[in-house]
Amino acid sequence: MAPVSRGPRCDGMEMMQRLVPDKLWELFLRVVPEAPVRPQGGGRRRADDRGVLAAILFVATSGCTWRQLPPVFGAF
């Protein structure tokens, strides 16, 4: 039996670009405050804002749970 073709795969950046196009990202930047600076350092590294927005949109539109997010989104 021949393998099932699922179409072209996309990398993480392409997925983010499709879910969060530049125009939407510009609108988002207008309403979200800048991240605070931690002068003392430490803590977890901040996640990429555009990647987080793309993950939120993916969960909201696909109906999957956070645990079902594809690996392309990284670990949140």
Image (cartoon, rainbow, N blue to C red):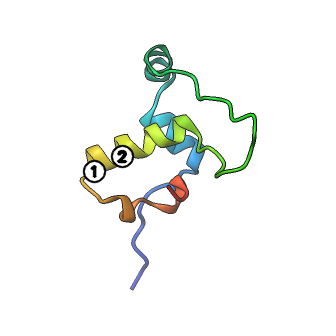
Looking at this rendering, what residue extends furthest in the bottom direction?
1
Where is residue 63 drawn, in percent x and y? 24, 53
Where is residue 56 drawn, in percent x and y? 38, 43
Viewer-closest of 65 and 39: 39
Question: Dot 1 lies on which element?
Answer: helix
Where is residue 65 drawn, in percent x and y? 30, 60
Looking at this rendering, what residue extends furthest in the front direction?
40
Numbered tag placed on residue 62 in the rendering: 1
Question: Dot 2 lies on which element?
Answer: helix
Numbered tag placed on residue 58 in the rendering: 2
Kind of residue indicated by mark 1: Ser
Viewer-closest of 19 and 10: 19
Q: Quadrant of residue 61?
A: top left
Q: Is residue 29 left or right of residue 45?
A: left
Viewer-closest of 21 and 5: 21
Numbered tag placed on residue 2 in the rendering: none
Q: Is residue 50 left or right of residue 36?
A: left
Name the residue at 38% across, 65% down: 67
Name the residue at 53% across, 35% down: 50
Q: Is residue 6 above or below residue 4?
A: above
Q: Is residue 60 left or right of residue 11?
A: left
Distance from label 2 to label 1 (Cα)? 6 Å
Name the residue at 43% across, 22% down: 24
Q: Quadrant of residue 38?
A: top right
| Label pair 2/1, CB-CB below 8 angstroms | yes
Name the residue at 43% across, 46% down: 55
Viewer-closest of 40 and 27: 40
Q: Residues within 10 Å of mark 1 (few under 14, many from 20)?
A: few
Query: In the picture, which quadrant includes the N terminus?
Result: bottom left
Q: Is residue 28 above or below residue 56?
A: above
